[in-house]
Amino acid sequence: MNKITFTVLAVTKTYSGYCIAGMDQNGEWVRPLPPDRESKFFSSLAYENGELVKVGDVWSITNYQTETDKLSVAHTEDIRIKRFNSFQLVNQLTNKALINFVSSHQESYHELLDTLDARGRSLCMIKIDEFRQVEEKVRITFIYKGKKYRNTTFTKGFPVTDLKWRAYLKGIQIPNSYRSIYAIIGLARKEPKKDIYKEYPMIISLITDPDVPILDSYPH
């Protein structure tokens, strides 16, 4: 049986559930899906001890299978966990260790373009120069290698679904200077029933040095 050592790099809210994404020990993207084959999202973020899943958690996943999304074909990173006891929390990285991990696995301009254009992938992590909030909305623009990215749709700014950062963008003062910032871009799935016919990009995680603490309101 194959085993994945999986580091959580993004935790987002999607409707009434939660989406989790990260990388394995080789820097390959993984998006775990819950045992319920009817759902793409976890119904809870709580471990058995009541602690909440957060960025920097490390799991051991032992019973899973890859899964293809026939509707959103760019979602090539999905795996379906067979049972809830198929994964265990085995470590929680300090922010320094987390920064070392993402620094060693940051991706390139071409991988960013492939993600934005939904060419065979739906996740990407890049080190950005800076980001700016858009007009007090839960959206940001960012600068990467000197170029400003506003979004690939008509609405200015990328929606931010990162559960930790949404709380800050809703009006809480945040630092404006960082030694490093890593942005993870993820694609939303198509939902024809809701007139969503295109996989569009969102900011699903921001990882910074120095760290920004999780607020008491997390994960709401």
Image (cartoon, helix red, strand yellow):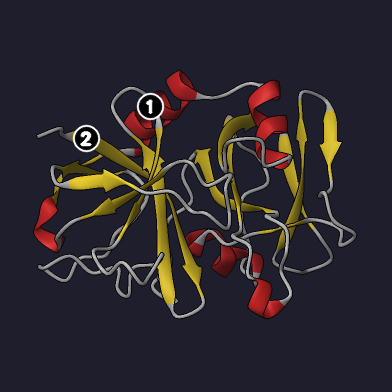
Q: Are marks 2 and 1 in contact (CB under 8 Å)?
A: no
Image-based side of 42 in relation to 109, left or right: left
Could one spot residue 9 in this view of the protein? Answer: no
* Residue 168, horizontal then vertical, whole percent: 59, 64
* Residue 210, horizontal then vertical, whole percent: 49, 39
Q: Which residue is mark 2?
A: 4
Residue 128 found in image quarter: top right
Q: Which residue is mark 1?
A: 101
* Residue 31, horizontal then vertical, whole percent: 39, 48
**Residue 15 vertical placement versus 41 (above, below):** below
Residue 147 found in image quarter: top right
Nearer to us of marks 2 and 1 is 2
- Label 1 crowd (10 A; few <14 / some 14-19 / many >=20): some
Total residue callouts: 2
Image-based side of 60 in relation to 204, left or right: left
Identify the residue at image location x=39%, y=25%.
Answer: 27
Give the amino acid type for the residue marked by disc 2 in the picture. Ile
